[in-house]
Image (cartoon, rainbow, N blue to C red):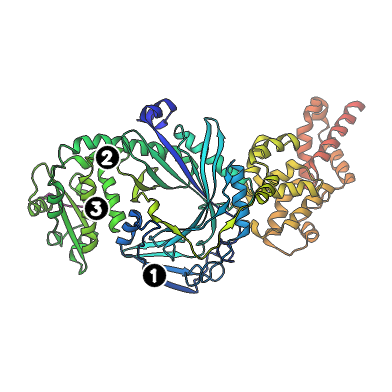
Amino acid sequence: MKKTREGKVPECRKLGFKAGLEIHQQLDCGKLFCRCPTNPLPTNAVPEVVTERRLRVSAGELGEVDVAALEAAGKKSTFSYDFFSQNCCLVELDEEPPMPEMNADALDIALEISLLLNCTPVDELHTMRKTVVDGSNTSGFQRTLLLATEGFVETSRGRVGITQVQLEEDASRILERKSGLVRYSLERLGLPLVEIVTDPDIMDFEHAKETAKKIGMICRSTGRVKRGIGSIRQDINVSIFGGARTEIKGAQELGLIPEIVGLEVERQKSLILIAGKAKKIVGPLWLETARASIVDVSELFTDSKCAFIKKGASGKDTVVLCAVMPGFSGMLKQKVTPTKTLGLELSGYAKAKAGVGGIIHSDEDLSKYPVTDSQADKVKKALKAGKGDLFVMVVAQKNSAKKALEAVIERAGTLSGRVPEETRNALADANTEYLRPLAGSARMYPETDVRLIEVTKEKVRQIKECLPEILEEKEKRYLKEFGLNRKVAGNLVGSTYWPLFEKMVSDTQANPLTIATVLTEDFKSLSREGVDLEQLDSVVLLEMFRFAASGKISNKSIPKLVSFMASNPGFSLEKAVEKLGLSAAGDELIKKIVKEVVSKNRPVVLEKGFRAISVVMGESMKALGGGADGKKVSRVVKLEIERLLSES
């Protein structure tokens, strides 16, 4: 099993493995169709308005209704939206049409990314509406437009094609999901993002991770994309021979991508094997029999020792419903991945389609709930279940419980067929869970409130002439031009501070390695200590490095000064240096201290010679209180040791 999940190219070829990526990267600019900013909300922000909506499904451009939208609408959920005036307006509430002209900055950034991906921009941009009825868009659709096509990225496994790049608005951020109600925050709605779709050129599991990393690096090379959790999201499309294209949503951690892809391959392989067994069980009347068997067994559990079962059995609006699955005894124990059973797989359909917490079935250890043997026997009797039959139980509101059982029965009844095309959600353990049917083209129709935009050859030429340096190339240049080591250079280009580094190097005489180390390692340590670096003015930081370059402060004192200035914005830098006692020691003081230390350690110096440098250096720096340039002290130490040795 482990060998298969490693997913080397030969094994993947034998399986007929195909995979492609859809990468969504937020852009660092204002919203796409209004003039609201996209700054993050304070943690204690309170919404000024909370509104509720119900959404209905509508037909697409071809008059067809998308199956994914239809299923979402069938849940009949109510959606609640938190509105914040700091970064929301009537456009987010769908009480006002979008601006007829989209955000020009967003378009320029998206075109820049497209060209860095070797894509060809389209001549005209037509905004489309993509039906979304899960409540994440107040309007019931997402605005999206095709920007560029036919590009590529180079990887260690060869070239991966870029099918297309789209510019679209991000959805609302989900806050809470409970029975019949989903709560969203509107501050993210309308934020511009690019969707980058690759060809199915992924060769193996690790290659998926490498490709995602490469595309993310190219996006970050612009210096105009959002960073942090949720700012970039990877969706993965996977299929094998005998399986089906499955879209896996929400693979946010690059490190998990190979495991997610590997487990999806395992899941499809297992379902193909399970289909052979299910064909022997599921006959023409199986679905009808299973659906007709649903009964209310609440009275059997009014004295249950399990709190949630007892509550469901005794509640006014809740029930315990059961259904029989003829011939399925033992089937739900089977593994679809090394860590997931078929029972958990079917439970995902109940959760997604009915909003219940899950299912209980007779193939699992019922004592953990606990359901006693006596209760289980009574359930089987109520269902008229035979020896080879399995029962499934759901505790929820009556309509939800019935819908959940029907979802489980329907999926079980189709196990004998092909693996279904569907959209699944990535879980923390790298397994996936059913989310909705795979969406199709029926959900698209034209947006009439936004003007089309011509992408002229001149505009493309201007952007192409000013394309930024790719971060991979930037790292190589930092190694060669500034003498940074590979670790520091890699950390720097992987952070958000490389533009600041280039400005600091250009505008000061400070050592580039010192600047890079402060911006990466020292900043990381200070953040862990709780220092709010957002409060540090870049102009003040620039002046710190000028102080260090001129010898007013030592390089080692910069982190302490950064911490103080971040906590005391507006404080004079000169006064801060004086208050903290960080003024660098002058040449005369350095000579005086070093001479005293050498004299004190005369026997050691005479015995070890220049091997005593580390002892003298350490004591000298300690005596100077860190307020001296290490290079200066080192030079003086060497001269003093040389003088003593020559005189003896």
To which residue does mark 3 refer?
A: 407
Circle on res. 53? 1
Q: Dot 3, crowdedness within 10 Å: few (<14), some or many (≥20)?
A: many
Task: Identify the main secondary structure in magenta.
Answer: loop
| Tags 1 and 3 touching, CB below 8 Å | no
C-alpha span from label 3 to label 2: 17 Å
Residue segment shown in magenta: 368-373
Task: Give the farthest residue toward the right.
Answer: 647
C-alpha span from label 1 to label 3: 26 Å
Vertical order, 259 against 191 (above or below): above
Q: Provide residue 278's location: percent of width, then percent of height.
A: 19, 39
Asked whether the viewer can see residue 428, the reply is no
Q: How many numbered marks have been drawn onto this rendered protein structure?
A: 3
Asked whether the viewer can see residue 110, the reply is yes
Label 2: state its secondary structure.
Answer: loop
- Residue 522 or residue 556, whichever sits in front: 522
Q: Nearer the viewer, mark 3 or mark 2?
A: 2
Q: Earlier in the sequence, mark 3 or mark 2?
A: 3
Q: Earlier in the sequence, mark 2 or mark 1?
A: 1
- Residue 129 or residue 485, whichever sits in front: 129
Circle 1: residue type: Arg
Circle 3: residue type: Ala
Label 3: state its secondary structure.
Answer: helix
Q: Provide residue 575's location: percent of width, then percent of height.
A: 79, 61
Circle on res. 511? none
Task: Give the farthest residue toward the bottom.
Answer: 48
Quadrant assignment, res 389: top left
Residue drawn at point x = 75 percent, y = 36 percent: 481
Say which quadrant the C terminus sits in. Answer: top right
* Left or right of 261 on screen, residue 506: right
* Residue 372 among those drawn in magenta: yes
* Left or right of 186 on screen, residue 421: left
